[in-house]
């Protein structure tokens, strides 16, 4: 029997999804259908209020859709409840604009924390954490605390923590929002490297220059609706 390539398998599917907030006058997401295959690298772009953040929160099951169906890595999110939600989220790496590191723990322990949550052995942690620190170029910073690091270094730690458990999907919500152009470029190269190793990467961004340089798939939202979806897209002004 012929095996399917990872890119032939849908990793994220939204079918006719709508999200209306209480007291909202317009849907944040409006009858949106979307498919992202395993191994894809996808940018989601759009102005403020376009629905980008709502989309991320739906994929993390921090919000539930008003209607429609969301499937992620073979799981119907509507059927996840209680502890199954926490377990589902552990299978997704997430990187935010504001890093969200534990300030009272050093670099090593920030990353190891993600492994301890899923009850990995100390022996496994001692092997895996240095591996991801080497990947993000911070092998010599493992004893440093977040306050001792630059913004670019903190985002590298956040990225290492997001991938330490080898997630099938990495969601990056404005990962370069607090970084200068040089650090932004380096973070995007790391995301590309992670994608080349098989992880499906979805990046929400306002950074027009990065999107237009990398020429990946670009999904553009406006008022909760997909207005363009291009395989080697650019991010243009309205």
Image (cartoon, rainbow, N blue to C red):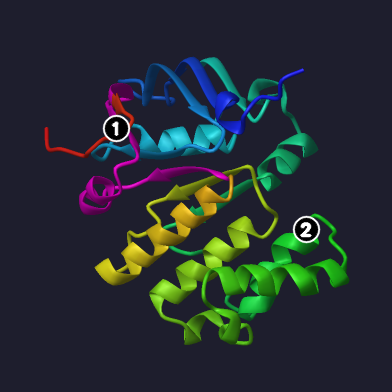
Confirm whether residue 65 shows in the render.
no
Specify start and end residues of the magenta stretch as a single range. Answer: 199-228
Mark 2: secondary structure: helix
Residue 225 drawn in magenta? yes
- The relative height of residue 74 versus residue 108 in the rendered view (above or below) is above
Q: Residues within 10 Å of mark 2 (few under 14, many from 20)?
A: few
Looking at this view, name the residue that lies furthest to the left: 238
Spot occupied by residue 233 in the image (x, y as percentages of width and height): 26, 35
Instruction: Determine whether, in the image, residue 54 is placed left or right of residue 179.
Output: right
Q: Are marks 2 and 1 in contact (CB under 8 Å)?
A: no
Q: Position of residue 3 (x, y in %)?
A: 71, 25
Residue drawn at 29 percent across, 70 percent down: 182
Tell me if residue 90 is in the magenta stretch: no
What is the number of the mark on residue 50? 1
Q: Which mark is residue 117?
A: 2
Q: Earlier in the sequence, mark 2 or mark 1?
A: 1
Q: Is residue 236 left or right of residue 206?
A: left
């Amino acid at each position: 029997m012929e095996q399917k390539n990872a890119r032939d398998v849908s990793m994220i599917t939204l079918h006719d999804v709508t999200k209306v907030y209480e007291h909202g006058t317009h849907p944040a997401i409006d009858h949106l259908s979307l498919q992202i295959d395993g191994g894809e690298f996808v940018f989601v772009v759009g102005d403020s209020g376009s629905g980008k953040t709502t989309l991320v929160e739906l994929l993390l099951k921090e919000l539930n859709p008003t209607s429609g169906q969301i499937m992620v890595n073979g799981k119907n999110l509507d059927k996840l409840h209680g502890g199954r939600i926490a377990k589902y989220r552990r299978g997704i790496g997430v990187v935010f604009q504001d890093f969200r590191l534990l300030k009272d723990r050093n670099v090593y322990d920030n990353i190891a924390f993600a492994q301890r949550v899923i009850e990995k052995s100390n022996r496994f942690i001692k092997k895996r954490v240095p591996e991801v620190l080497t990947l993000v170029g911070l092998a010599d910073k493992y004893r440093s605390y977040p306050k001792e690091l630059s913004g670019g270094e903190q985002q590298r730690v956040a990225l290492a923590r997001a991938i330490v458990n080898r997630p099938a999907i990495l969601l990056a919500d404005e990962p370069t929002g607090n970084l200068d152009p040089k650090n932004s470029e380096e973070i995007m190269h790391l995301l590309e490297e992670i994608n080349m190793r098989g992880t499906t990467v979805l990046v929400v961004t306002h950074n027009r220059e990065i999107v237009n340089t990398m020429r990946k798939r670009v999904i553009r939202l406006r008022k909760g609706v997909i207005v363009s979806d291009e395989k080697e897209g650019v991010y243009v002004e309205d």
